[in-house]
Image: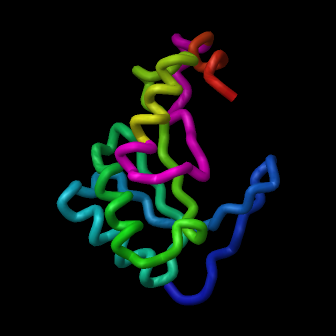
Amino acid sequence: MTGKSTMITLNNGVQMPALGLGVFQSPPQETATAVTTALQHGYRLIDTAAVYGNEKEVGEGIVASGVDRGEVFVTTKLWLSDFGHDATLRAFDTSLSRLGLDYLDLYLLHFPYTSEFDSTRNAPR
């Protein structure tokens, strides 16, 4: 990838790259290298999720890339079993710790779980 990715402005004014590397089904032993390589070739968005089991390696790849953390947009996702206010806060902290980061750029519900709508709706804001 050469040049810069088109940026998308989210509803809160935050800008995120339109193109990035997703690590779904990336084996942990290959993830750090994939992330490092992507960042060194111009990618600036990395998308992972707690359930993928490779957040630790995503963080390692970010560090190994040599790209400043402020230039990398990192998103991860909350899994269904962690819906609800207190569980969400714990899951967020766990993901942040696994990634070895001080902050996330975007934290998403992995997907809506309609039978647990009240827990989804009462997540922290």
- Colour treatment of the image: rainbow
Tell me where residue 35 appears, x and y as whole percent.
Answer: 37, 68
In this picture, residue 94 sits left or right of residue 116: left
Which residue sits at x=59%, y=71%?
71
Q: Which residues are magenta?
A: 96-117
Which residue sits at x=57%, y=14%?
119
From this view, report whether residue 11 is shown above or below residue 18: above
Q: Quadrant of the C terminus?
A: top right
In this picture, residue 70 sits left or right of residue 31: right
From this view, report whether residue 6 is shown above or below residue 89: below
Tell me where residue 62 appears, x and y as whole percent.
Answer: 41, 67
Which residue of the protein is positioned furthest toward the bottom in this rendering?
A: 2
In this picture, residue 111 sits left or right of residue 10: left
Q: Residue 44's image quarter? A: bottom right
**17 and 99: which is toward the camera:** 99
| Picture mark count | 0
In the rendered structure, does residue 56 fall within the stretch colored magenta? no
Which residue sits at x=73%, y=62%?
15
Tell me where residue 85 appears, x and y as whole percent.
Answer: 57, 18
Tell me where residue 111 appears, x and y as whole percent.
Answer: 52, 32
**110 and 13: which is toward the camera:** 13
Which residue of the protein is positioned furthest toward the front in this rendering?
A: 102
From this view, report whether residue 105 is shown above or below residue 33: above
Q: Residue 72's image quarter? A: bottom right
Which residue sits at x=22%, y=64%?
30
